[in-house]
Image (spheres, grey):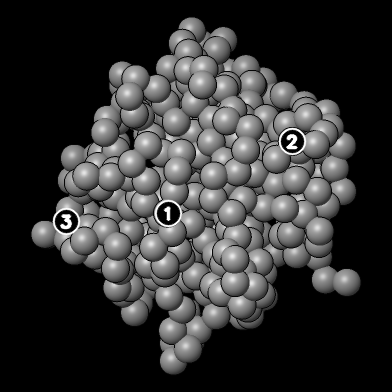
Amino acid sequence: MEVTRRTALAGLCASAVAGPALARERGIDLAPFRTPHKLGRLIVTKGDDPAGFDGKFVDAPMVFRGPDRFYMTFYGFDGTGYQTGIAESQDLIAWKKLGIALARDPSSPITRYNIAMSSILREPGLRSAGRPLKVKGRYVASWNAYPSPGMEEGPAVIGLAWSDDLIRWERDDTPILRPEDGAEWERGGLYKSYLTRDGDTFYLYYNAKNRDVPWLEQIGVATSRDLKTWTRHPGNPIVKVGAPGSNDARFAANPWVLRHKGLWAMYYYGYTSRRGARDLLAIGRDPFNFEKVAEPMIDRGVPGSVDETHAHKPSVIWHDGALWHFYCAVAGTWPDEVRGISVARSTPW
Protein backbone atom coordinates (compact mmCIF):
# COMPACT_ATOMS: atom_id res chain seq x y z
CA MET A 1 0.00 0.00 0.00
CA GLU A 2 1.28 3.48 -0.86
CA VAL A 3 2.23 5.52 2.19
CA THR A 4 0.27 8.79 2.26
CA ARG A 5 0.27 11.68 4.68
CA ARG A 6 -2.89 10.24 6.24
CA THR A 7 -1.49 6.76 6.80
CA ALA A 8 1.70 8.32 8.15
CA LEU A 9 -0.41 9.91 10.88
CA ALA A 10 -1.97 6.61 11.95
CA GLY A 11 -0.97 4.08 14.59
CA LEU A 12 -0.42 6.11 17.75
CA CYS A 13 0.25 5.91 21.49
CA ALA A 14 -0.68 8.42 24.18
CA SER A 15 2.71 9.74 25.33
CA ALA A 16 4.28 13.05 24.29
CA VAL A 17 8.00 13.77 24.16
CA ALA A 18 9.29 17.32 24.44
CA GLY A 19 12.31 18.82 22.76
CA PRO A 20 14.76 21.37 24.20
CA ALA A 21 13.21 24.41 25.92
CA LEU A 22 15.36 26.84 23.97
CA ALA A 23 13.01 29.82 24.12
CA ARG A 24 12.37 29.54 27.85
CA GLU A 25 16.06 29.11 28.59
CA ARG A 26 16.66 32.49 26.97
CA GLY A 27 14.26 34.23 29.34
CA ILE A 28 11.24 34.59 27.06
CA ASP A 29 7.90 34.82 28.87
CA LEU A 30 5.65 32.18 27.29
CA ALA A 31 2.47 33.17 29.15
CA PRO A 32 1.12 35.42 26.34
CA PHE A 33 1.28 32.54 23.85
CA ARG A 34 -0.33 29.73 25.86
CA THR A 35 -3.86 28.45 25.17
CA PRO A 36 -4.37 25.60 27.65
CA HIS A 37 -8.17 25.69 28.09
CA LYS A 38 -9.93 23.45 25.57
CA LEU A 39 -13.62 23.77 24.74
CA GLY A 40 -13.68 19.99 24.46
CA ARG A 41 -16.08 19.59 21.56
CA LEU A 42 -16.21 20.07 17.80
CA ILE A 43 -17.55 23.40 16.57
CA VAL A 44 -17.39 22.66 12.81
CA THR A 45 -17.99 19.17 11.45
CA LYS A 46 -18.43 17.47 8.08
CA GLY A 47 -21.50 18.37 6.07
CA ASP A 48 -24.83 16.59 6.29
CA ASP A 49 -24.73 15.70 2.58
CA PRO A 50 -22.30 12.79 2.03
CA ALA A 51 -21.88 13.95 -1.57
CA GLY A 52 -21.17 17.56 -0.62
CA PHE A 53 -17.79 19.29 -0.86
CA ASP A 54 -17.24 18.61 2.86
CA GLY A 55 -19.09 15.31 2.98
CA LYS A 56 -16.11 13.27 4.21
CA PHE A 57 -14.48 15.67 6.69
CA VAL A 58 -13.42 19.24 7.42
CA ASP A 59 -9.87 20.28 8.21
CA ALA A 60 -7.37 23.15 8.65
CA PRO A 61 -9.34 26.11 10.08
CA MET A 62 -8.31 29.68 9.28
CA VAL A 63 -10.11 32.33 11.37
CA PHE A 64 -10.16 36.08 10.80
CA ARG A 65 -12.26 39.11 11.70
CA GLY A 66 -14.65 40.67 9.19
CA PRO A 67 -16.30 44.09 9.42
CA ASP A 68 -19.15 42.87 11.65
CA ARG A 69 -18.49 39.17 12.34
CA PHE A 70 -15.85 36.47 12.28
CA TYR A 71 -15.13 34.21 9.34
CA MET A 72 -13.50 30.81 9.15
CA THR A 73 -12.25 29.18 6.01
CA PHE A 74 -11.66 25.44 6.16
CA TYR A 75 -10.77 22.56 3.91
CA GLY A 76 -13.65 20.36 2.85
CA PHE A 77 -12.90 16.89 1.47
CA ASP A 78 -15.35 14.95 -0.68
CA GLY A 79 -13.25 11.93 -1.59
CA THR A 80 -11.88 13.55 -4.74
CA GLY A 81 -9.93 16.44 -3.21
CA TYR A 82 -9.99 19.63 -1.20
CA GLN A 83 -12.12 22.70 -1.74
CA THR A 84 -12.24 25.72 0.54
CA GLY A 85 -15.37 26.31 2.57
CA ILE A 86 -16.30 29.37 4.60
CA ALA A 87 -18.38 29.85 7.76
CA GLU A 88 -19.41 32.87 9.84
CA SER A 89 -19.83 33.49 13.57
CA GLN A 90 -20.62 36.28 16.02
CA ASP A 91 -18.99 34.65 19.05
CA LEU A 92 -16.29 32.27 17.67
CA ILE A 93 -18.18 29.23 19.01
CA ALA A 94 -21.41 28.93 17.00
CA TRP A 95 -20.56 28.73 13.29
CA LYS A 96 -22.83 28.82 10.24
CA LYS A 97 -21.46 27.46 6.98
CA LEU A 98 -21.91 29.73 3.96
CA GLY A 99 -20.70 27.36 1.25
CA ILE A 100 -17.58 27.28 -0.93
CA ALA A 101 -15.24 30.29 -0.96
CA LEU A 102 -12.70 28.87 -3.40
CA ALA A 103 -13.75 26.01 -5.69
CA ARG A 104 -11.66 23.69 -7.82
CA ASP A 105 -11.72 24.28 -11.54
CA PRO A 106 -12.10 21.16 -13.74
CA SER A 107 -10.60 23.06 -16.68
CA SER A 108 -7.38 23.92 -14.82
CA PRO A 109 -4.40 21.53 -14.76
CA ILE A 110 -3.44 23.08 -11.40
CA THR A 111 -6.74 23.16 -9.48
CA ARG A 112 -8.84 20.56 -11.26
CA TYR A 113 -8.91 18.36 -8.14
CA ASN A 114 -7.89 20.57 -5.20
CA ILE A 115 -7.65 24.12 -3.96
CA ALA A 116 -7.06 24.81 -0.28
CA MET A 117 -6.87 28.38 1.02
CA SER A 118 -4.11 28.58 3.62
CA SER A 119 -3.95 32.15 4.94
CA ILE A 120 -5.22 35.70 4.47
CA LEU A 121 -2.91 38.67 4.85
CA ARG A 122 -4.01 40.15 8.19
CA GLU A 123 -2.91 42.40 11.01
CA PRO A 124 0.23 40.72 12.37
CA GLY A 125 -0.02 41.39 16.09
CA LEU A 126 -0.74 38.54 18.49
CA ARG A 127 -3.24 40.81 20.28
CA SER A 128 -4.42 42.72 17.24
CA ALA A 129 -8.01 42.41 16.08
CA GLY A 130 -6.90 40.08 13.30
CA ARG A 131 -8.48 42.13 10.52
CA PRO A 132 -7.49 41.34 6.91
CA LEU A 133 -5.32 43.88 5.10
CA LYS A 134 -5.76 45.07 1.54
CA VAL A 135 -3.09 45.28 -1.14
CA LYS A 136 -3.92 47.76 -3.90
CA GLY A 137 -7.54 47.81 -2.79
CA ARG A 138 -8.16 44.04 -2.51
CA TYR A 139 -7.75 41.31 0.08
CA VAL A 140 -5.14 38.66 -0.70
CA ALA A 141 -4.83 35.02 0.41
CA SER A 142 -2.49 32.12 -0.26
CA TRP A 143 -3.58 28.64 -1.35
CA ASN A 144 -2.05 25.30 -2.23
CA ALA A 145 -3.24 22.72 -4.75
CA TYR A 146 -2.37 19.06 -5.33
CA PRO A 147 -2.26 17.89 -8.96
CA SER A 148 -3.96 14.50 -8.58
CA PRO A 149 -7.25 13.21 -7.13
CA GLY A 150 -7.23 11.78 -3.63
CA MET A 151 -5.89 12.84 -0.28
CA GLU A 152 -2.98 15.26 -0.95
CA GLU A 153 -1.72 13.30 -3.94
CA GLY A 154 1.24 14.63 -5.90
CA PRO A 155 3.62 17.57 -5.44
CA ALA A 156 1.49 20.62 -4.59
CA VAL A 157 2.14 24.23 -5.59
CA ILE A 158 1.32 27.52 -3.83
CA GLY A 159 -0.56 30.45 -5.37
CA LEU A 160 -2.51 33.60 -4.47
CA ALA A 161 -6.19 34.54 -4.55
CA TRP A 162 -7.99 37.89 -4.31
CA SER A 163 -11.30 39.12 -2.92
CA ASP A 164 -13.35 42.29 -2.52
CA ASP A 165 -15.70 41.00 0.19
CA LEU A 166 -13.78 38.21 2.03
CA ILE A 167 -16.38 35.63 0.93
CA ARG A 168 -15.90 35.18 -2.81
CA TRP A 169 -12.32 34.62 -3.98
CA GLU A 170 -10.62 34.53 -7.37
CA ARG A 171 -7.32 32.73 -7.79
CA ASP A 172 -4.34 33.76 -9.86
CA ASP A 173 -3.62 31.31 -12.66
CA THR A 174 0.14 31.19 -12.12
CA PRO A 175 1.55 29.66 -8.89
CA ILE A 176 4.13 31.69 -6.98
CA LEU A 177 6.07 28.69 -5.62
CA ARG A 178 6.65 25.30 -7.22
CA PRO A 179 8.46 22.39 -5.56
CA GLU A 180 10.72 21.72 -8.54
CA ASP A 181 12.20 25.23 -8.18
CA GLY A 182 13.26 24.64 -4.58
CA ALA A 183 15.90 22.63 -2.78
CA GLU A 184 15.77 18.90 -2.12
CA TRP A 185 13.96 19.28 1.22
CA GLU A 186 10.85 20.59 -0.64
CA ARG A 187 10.94 18.66 -3.92
CA GLY A 188 8.23 16.26 -2.76
CA GLY A 189 5.62 19.04 -2.67
CA LEU A 190 4.46 22.15 -0.84
CA TYR A 191 1.83 22.24 1.88
CA LYS A 192 0.09 24.94 3.91
CA SER A 193 1.48 28.49 3.82
CA TYR A 194 1.14 31.64 5.90
CA LEU A 195 1.36 35.11 4.34
CA THR A 196 2.39 38.13 6.41
CA ARG A 197 4.01 41.51 5.85
CA ASP A 198 6.58 43.60 7.70
CA GLY A 199 7.18 47.04 6.21
CA ASP A 200 7.47 46.69 2.45
CA THR A 201 8.39 43.00 2.54
CA PHE A 202 5.97 40.09 2.28
CA TYR A 203 6.90 36.82 3.98
CA LEU A 204 5.44 33.48 2.91
CA TYR A 205 6.10 30.72 5.44
CA TYR A 206 5.31 27.22 4.20
CA ASN A 207 5.96 23.59 4.97
CA ALA A 208 7.10 21.09 2.38
CA LYS A 209 8.25 17.50 2.13
CA ASN A 210 11.23 15.76 0.64
CA ARG A 211 11.00 12.74 -1.66
CA ASP A 212 12.14 10.11 0.83
CA VAL A 213 9.84 7.32 2.00
CA PRO A 214 8.91 7.92 4.73
CA TRP A 215 9.28 11.64 4.10
CA LEU A 216 10.02 14.58 6.39
CA GLU A 217 8.08 17.87 6.46
CA GLN A 218 9.89 21.07 7.42
CA ILE A 219 9.20 24.82 7.29
CA GLY A 220 10.81 27.42 5.05
CA VAL A 221 10.13 31.03 4.06
CA ALA A 222 10.19 33.07 0.86
CA THR A 223 10.09 36.87 0.55
CA SER A 224 8.75 39.34 -2.00
CA ARG A 225 8.26 43.08 -2.46
CA ASP A 226 5.50 42.81 -5.06
CA LEU A 227 3.79 39.42 -4.43
CA LYS A 228 4.97 38.31 -7.88
CA THR A 229 8.69 37.61 -7.63
CA TRP A 230 9.59 35.42 -4.65
CA THR A 231 13.01 34.56 -3.22
CA ARG A 232 13.47 31.53 -1.02
CA HIS A 233 15.55 32.17 2.10
CA PRO A 234 19.03 30.65 1.68
CA GLY A 235 18.84 29.20 5.20
CA ASN A 236 15.73 27.10 4.49
CA PRO A 237 14.34 25.08 6.10
CA ILE A 238 14.23 27.51 9.02
CA VAL A 239 12.29 25.12 11.29
CA LYS A 240 13.65 21.60 10.89
CA VAL A 241 12.33 18.35 12.25
CA GLY A 242 13.53 17.49 15.73
CA ALA A 243 15.63 14.68 17.08
CA PRO A 244 14.20 11.14 17.20
CA GLY A 245 11.58 10.94 19.93
CA SER A 246 10.83 14.67 19.92
CA ASN A 247 7.37 16.09 19.28
CA ASP A 248 8.28 17.03 15.70
CA ALA A 249 10.60 14.21 14.69
CA ARG A 250 8.69 13.59 11.42
CA PHE A 251 6.73 16.75 10.62
CA ALA A 252 7.19 20.42 11.42
CA ALA A 253 4.20 21.79 9.54
CA ASN A 254 1.42 24.38 9.04
CA PRO A 255 3.08 27.60 10.24
CA TRP A 256 0.96 30.46 11.66
CA VAL A 257 3.19 33.47 12.33
CA LEU A 258 2.27 36.48 14.51
CA ARG A 259 4.29 39.14 16.31
CA HIS A 260 4.36 40.24 19.93
CA LYS A 261 6.62 42.78 21.65
CA GLY A 262 9.44 42.48 19.14
CA LEU A 263 9.20 38.69 18.84
CA TRP A 264 8.03 36.55 15.95
CA ALA A 265 5.80 33.73 17.20
CA MET A 266 5.37 30.71 14.94
CA TYR A 267 2.64 28.29 15.93
CA TYR A 268 3.03 25.04 14.02
CA TYR A 269 2.22 21.38 14.45
CA GLY A 270 4.64 18.60 15.10
CA TYR A 271 4.18 14.93 14.42
CA THR A 272 6.20 11.92 15.44
CA SER A 273 5.40 8.35 14.47
CA ARG A 274 3.15 6.52 16.93
CA ARG A 275 2.78 9.62 19.14
CA GLY A 276 0.40 11.70 17.05
CA ALA A 277 0.30 15.39 16.18
CA ARG A 278 0.07 18.43 18.46
CA ASP A 279 0.42 22.19 18.11
CA LEU A 280 3.81 23.61 19.06
CA LEU A 281 5.51 27.01 19.19
CA ALA A 282 8.79 28.49 18.01
CA ILE A 283 9.97 32.00 18.89
CA GLY A 284 12.15 34.27 16.75
CA ARG A 285 13.78 37.64 17.30
CA ASP A 286 13.74 38.11 13.51
CA PRO A 287 11.76 36.56 10.61
CA PHE A 288 14.32 33.86 9.84
CA ASN A 289 15.69 32.43 13.09
CA PHE A 290 13.34 30.54 15.39
CA GLU A 291 13.92 28.55 18.57
CA LYS A 292 11.52 25.82 19.56
CA VAL A 293 9.53 25.80 22.79
CA ALA A 294 9.43 22.45 24.56
CA GLU A 295 5.86 22.45 25.86
CA PRO A 296 2.97 21.94 23.42
CA MET A 297 0.55 24.83 23.04
CA ILE A 298 -2.21 22.25 22.52
CA ASP A 299 -1.64 18.57 23.19
CA ARG A 300 -3.65 15.50 22.31
CA GLY A 301 -6.55 14.72 24.61
CA VAL A 302 -7.32 11.74 26.79
CA PRO A 303 -8.88 8.60 25.30
CA GLY A 304 -12.46 9.29 24.34
CA SER A 305 -11.94 13.01 23.70
CA VAL A 306 -12.49 14.74 20.36
CA ASP A 307 -8.72 15.14 19.93
CA GLU A 308 -7.46 11.87 21.32
CA THR A 309 -5.54 11.13 18.11
CA HIS A 310 -4.38 14.54 16.83
CA ALA A 311 -4.68 18.17 17.99
CA HIS A 312 -3.05 20.13 15.21
CA LYS A 313 -3.08 22.77 12.42
CA PRO A 314 -3.25 26.06 14.38
CA SER A 315 -5.19 29.26 13.69
CA VAL A 316 -4.88 31.94 16.37
CA ILE A 317 -6.83 35.17 17.00
CA TRP A 318 -7.27 37.59 19.92
CA HIS A 319 -10.81 38.41 21.07
CA ASP A 320 -12.49 39.68 24.22
CA GLY A 321 -9.35 39.60 26.34
CA ALA A 322 -8.31 36.08 25.35
CA LEU A 323 -6.19 34.30 22.79
CA TRP A 324 -8.29 31.79 20.84
CA HIS A 325 -6.52 28.83 19.24
CA PHE A 326 -8.51 26.91 16.61
CA TYR A 327 -7.27 23.53 15.48
CA CYS A 328 -8.17 20.30 13.72
CA ALA A 329 -9.26 17.69 16.27
CA VAL A 330 -9.12 14.01 15.34
CA ALA A 331 -10.44 11.00 17.26
CA GLY A 332 -10.25 7.35 16.31
CA THR A 333 -8.05 5.64 13.74
CA TRP A 334 -8.00 6.07 9.98
CA PRO A 335 -10.10 5.16 8.02
CA ASP A 336 -12.72 5.33 10.81
CA GLU A 337 -11.49 8.53 12.44
CA VAL A 338 -13.70 11.54 13.20
CA ARG A 339 -12.08 14.78 12.00
CA GLY A 340 -13.43 18.27 12.73
CA ILE A 341 -12.54 21.67 14.15
CA SER A 342 -12.28 22.62 17.81
CA VAL A 343 -10.86 25.51 19.84
CA ALA A 344 -8.91 26.29 22.98
CA ARG A 345 -8.11 29.65 24.54
CA SER A 346 -5.92 31.37 27.08
CA THR A 347 -8.69 31.90 29.64
CA PRO A 348 -11.08 29.35 31.22
CA TRP A 349 -14.50 28.80 29.70
Q: Which one is closest to the eye, mark 2 or mark 3? A: 2
- The N terminus - image quarter: bottom right
Q: Which one is closest to the eye, mark 1 or mark 2? A: 1
Q: Estimate the spatial distance between the alpha carbons at disc 2 and disc 3, rounded to whole Å.
A: 42 Å
Residue ID for mark 2:
305
Say which mark, if any, is on residue 11: none
* Visible residue check, residue 249: no
**For the residue carrying disc 1, how many other residues have a C-alpha within 10 Å: few (<14), some (14-19), or many (20+)?**
some
Where in the figure is residue 270, as x and y percent of width and height?
A: 66, 39
Left or right: 144 in relation to 342: left
Task: Give whichever of discs 1 and 2 has the lower sequence position.
Answer: 1
Q: Residue sitting at 22 percent across and 54 percent down? A: 225
Q: Residue sitting at 18 percent across and 64 percent down? A: 164
Q: Which of 293 and 32 is in front in this view?
A: 32
Where in the figure is residue 63, as x and y percent of width and height?
A: 40, 45
Residue ID for mark 3:
135
**For the residue carrying disc 3, how many other residues have a C-alpha within 10 Å: few (<14), some (14-19), or many (20+)?**
few
What kind of residue is marked 3?
Val
Q: Estimate the spatial distance between the alpha carbons at disc 1 and disc 2, rounded to whole Å.
A: 23 Å
Residue that extends furthest to the left in the rendered view of this protein: 137
Against 10, residue 275 (above or below) is above
Task: Give whichever of discs 1 and 3 has the lower sequence position.
Answer: 1
Residue 19 occupies which quadrant of the picture?
A: top right
Label 3 near label 1: C-beta < 8 Å? no
Residue ID for mark 1:
96
Q: Residue sitting at 43 percent across and 59 percent down? A: 97
Against 346, residue 264 (above or below) is below
Against 91, residue 127 (above or below) is above
Q: Which one is closest to the eye, mark 1 or mark 3? A: 1
For numbered disc 2, what is the local secondary structure?
Answer: loop
For numbered disc 3, what is the local secondary structure?
Answer: strand
